Image (cartoon, rainbow, N blue to C red):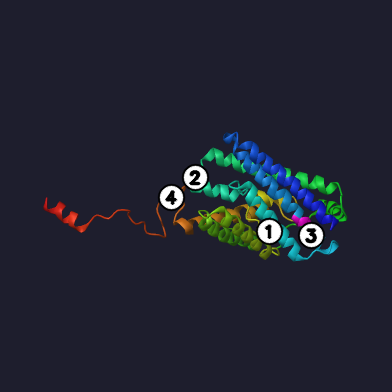
């Protein structure tokens, strides 16, 4: 239990930091992209600690998979509540750009902020493990230099897994985007938890380039290009397919609707057409 108490304190500290940044930025809307920095930092820093509980706590602390899945769900739910529209997910930022809801410069700033936040989250988690507050963290600190990669299959299988999971997530998320936050946020947290648990033996289904960068890119076993193929190109491909299926086209790339017939809003009565011909 002491390990979980220490982890709880760590989670609370990270959440307070992210919430403080979000609160301060309300006064300066021009710097709203920093919200993505805080969101990505919170997501990576907390998920790294969840990984620690999964990797070490299950065999050293006697914590079952039900505990780790519950902790991940609570982290994702808290992230959704605290960060709101700042997803901390590069794929979702690119989605808004492709939907013509964001311009080029804000998109680039948001993506850059997310990767900086992910890197800071990794540094903070590594420093926290180095304090060795519990036996679990002492073991994790020893394992940190030789961490285990989340990519447990071939590159093609990994790409396909991330692509399919991203397609599923974004397609459902697009259908939930107009729902009230009280419904949307818990459902998204459940969906992310389920996909992550289901793909645990494949890629862990991060579906987020900046999250994957913070969680597994520093682990040996694959090159940067190989990681990028699976964790960057895979989610982006799945996201674009989801947008194509949802809207029938990708507004930023082409306007023609490939799947759905666009009906005109107003219909001209037949009588009016006949009168025009007589005139």
4 and 3 marks in contact (CB < 8 Å) = no
Q: Nearer the viewer, mark 1 or mark 4?
A: 1
3 and 2 marks in contact (CB < 8 Å) = no
Q: Nearer the viewer, mark 4 or mark 3?
A: 3
Q: Nearer the viewer, residue 260 or 10?
A: 10
* Residue located at (48% from left, 58% from top): 246
In magenta segment, residue 28: no
**Mark 4 nearby-residue class (10 Å; few <14, some 14–19, many ≥20):** few
Counting residues from the N terminus, which is met first, the one under dot 3 or under dot 2? Answer: 3
- Looking at the rendering, which quadrant does residue 139 occupy? bottom right
> What distance separates the C-alpha of mark 2 from that of mark 4?
15 Å
Q: Is residue 53 above or below residue 93?
A: below
Expressed as whole percent of the image width and height from the top left, the position of residue 245 reads 48, 59
1 and 3 marks in contact (CB < 8 Å) = no
Q: Which residues are magenta?
A: 50-54
Left/right placement of residue 98 relative to residue 153 reads left
Q: Which mark is residue 55?
A: 3
Counting residues from the N terminus, which is met first, the one under dot 2 or under dot 4? Answer: 2
SS of the residue at dot 3?
A: helix
* Residue located at (82% from left, 59% from top): 56
Q: Which mark is residue 254?
A: 4
> What distance separates the C-alpha of mark 1 from that of mark 4?
37 Å
Residue 188 appears in the figure? yes
**Mark 3 nearby-residue class (10 Å; few <14, some 14–19, many ≥20):** some
SS of the residue at dot 2?
A: loop
Counting residues from the N terminus, which is met first, the one under dot 1 or under dot 2? Answer: 1
Counting residues from the N terminus, which is met first, the one under dot 1 or under dot 3? Answer: 3
Q: Which residue is mark 1?
A: 73
């Amino acid at each position: 239990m002491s390990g979980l108490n220490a982890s709880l304190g760590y989670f609370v500290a990270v959440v307070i930091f992210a919430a403080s940044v979000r609160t301060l930025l309300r006064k300066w809307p021009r710097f709203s992209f920093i919200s993505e920095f805080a969101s990505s930092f919170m997501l990576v820093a907390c998920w790294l600690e969840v990984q620690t509980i999964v990797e070490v706590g299950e065999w050293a602390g006697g914590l079952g998979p039900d505990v780790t899945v519950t902790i991940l769900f609570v982290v994702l739910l808290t992230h959704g509540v605290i960060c709101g529209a700042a997803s901390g997910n590069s794929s979702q930022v690119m989605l808004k750009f492709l939907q013509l809801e964001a311009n080029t410069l804000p998109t680039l700033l948001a993506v850059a902020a997310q990767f900086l936040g992910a890197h800071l989250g990794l540094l903070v988690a590594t420093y926290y493990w180095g304090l060795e507050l519990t036996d679990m963290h002492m073991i994790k600190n020893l394992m940190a230099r030789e961490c285990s990669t989340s990519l447990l299959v071939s590159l093609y299988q990994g790409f396909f897994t991330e692509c399919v999971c991203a397609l599923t997530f974004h397609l459902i998320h697009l259908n939930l985007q107009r729902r009230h936050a009280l419904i949307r946020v818990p459902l998204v947290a459940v969906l992310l938890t389920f996909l992550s648990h289901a793909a645990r033996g494949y890629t862990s289904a991060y579906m987020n380039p900046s999250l994957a960068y913070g969680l597994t890119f520093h682990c040996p076993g694959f090159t940067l290009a190989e990681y990028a193929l699976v964790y960057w190109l895979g989610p982006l491909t799945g996201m674009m397919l989801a947008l194509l299926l949802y809207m029938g086209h990708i507004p930023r790339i082409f306007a023609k609707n490939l799947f759905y017939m666009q009906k005109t809003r107003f219909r001209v009565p037949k009588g009016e057409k006949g009168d025009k011909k007589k005139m």
